[in-house]
Image: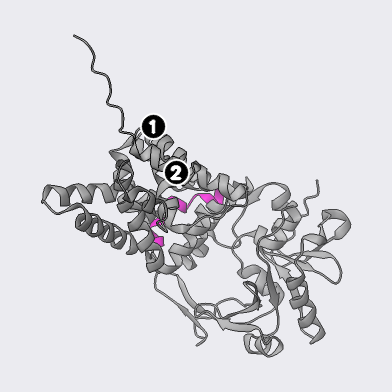
Amino acid sequence: MKNTNNKPGQLKRIPFSEHQIDESNICQQARFVVETLIEANYQAYLVGGCVRDLVLGIEPKDFDVATDAHPEQICELFDNSRLIGRRFRIVHVYFGRNNIEVSTFRAASRHNNKSSKQESTGRIVRDNTFGTIEEDALRRDFTINALYYDIEKSEVLDYCSGYDDLLNKKICMIGDVATRYREDPVRILRALRFRAKLDLDIDAGTEQPIKKLGHLLSDIPPARLFDEVIKLFHSGYAVRCFQELNRYQLLKILFPITHKALKHNESFGLLIHNALENTDTRIAGGKSVNPAFIFSILLWQPYLQLLEQTTKQGIPYAEGAWSAGRTTVLDQSTVTSIPKRFSIMICEIWKLQNRFKRKQGKKILRFLDHPRFRAAYDFMCIRAQAGEIDQADCQWWTKLQTLSTQEQHKMIALKPRKPNKKKT
């Protein structure tokens, strides 16, 4: 195994024959964007996670491009593009529902520059100082994400020993670790996600400040934290990511009411584990997943605690369920925002749990047609797996969905058997 340990900023070229990248895994839209920029006399390379995954033999889900063209110049080349971002101005080039993210090479932050702004904590809130590819590499977070792929020459360009770190299965921060975490605390979550997803080890120096600086995540805008949490739990390795959050004491920062509820309820932990495992299985099978489901699981016990309070106050169930649901979602939204379309679905999943207790009556079949029935049913079955409710309830509703309408009416008409009383 080679280990050149090139100094930061020193270029190492790794030819196609050495890393054996399968170029068929490079999507045509990404190739088109790169080739269009090159034809316009700009430098352009695939960069970051997509190159890392190509080197590892993983088919990338997303493709990013880095170039010396400025955002406005990129937009002039692509009619199907849009300039986005305030903290970092980047361009999205759209191809139907998909997009290729194109960013301009960045230079080191210059605090006397109007294009850059940094808070007293060290967090960078605006940075549009453009530079060279060498400077851009040093601005990236981890060495394994500072790799560029030259499509024309079929070469990986490595300025920070990221290629060797990949071979050695290491996650290493570029630059002073504490400073880089302070610049953007979300790098902490990225390190844990890469560890869980790629089965890499976090370098000791990169790992050491995580617990100490984890509190800085509280300064991140809730909308951005929502996106990062979804990346964790929809990575296909949600169980591992949850374990990482616990290991580094970050769950209490991202989900304070969940963390508090877990201290007093062991079965809640089993419920979360089963749900995350189910999510990983669905993603591995190419099935869809919804952010609302993950949040409905993580906030279930805090919701039940509030619902119990409304019941003691004599508030009717329907009113109390919505009130407890809204309050729970709002409490979590102070840390990670929850878009309205998801918050409504979360509350509906919770409220509908009470409907599964009823197995007779004309409304049963109408319940099967409810737009949230499937999500609520999946939630109920996971509760049964965790021992929170009787497994027979899940089996009853599962069977009902397999029958014809006539057979469903017969099943609903049957009175539930009462358990036999033991003779004394």
Where's residue 201, x and y in %? 60, 45
The residue segment tinted magenta is 203-217
Where's residue 399, x and y in %? 46, 38
Identity of the residue drawn at 62% across and 47% down = 285
Identity of the residue drawn at 67% across and 58% down = 144
Label 1 and label 2: CA atoms lie apart by 22 Å
Label 1 close to label 2 by CB (< 8 Å): no
**Amino acid at dot 1:** Ala
- Secondary structure state at the residue bearing disc 1: helix
Picture colour scheme: one colour
Identity of the residue drawn at 65% across and 75% down = 96
Magenta stretch encompasses residue 209: yes
> Mainly helix, strand or loop, the magenta region?
helix
**Crowd around label 1: few <14 · some 14–19 · many ≥20 (10 Å):** few
Residue on which disc 2 sits: 406
Residue 392, numbered circle? 1
Where's residue 312, x and y in %? 12, 47
As rendered, which of 116 and 267 lies closer to the eye?
A: 267
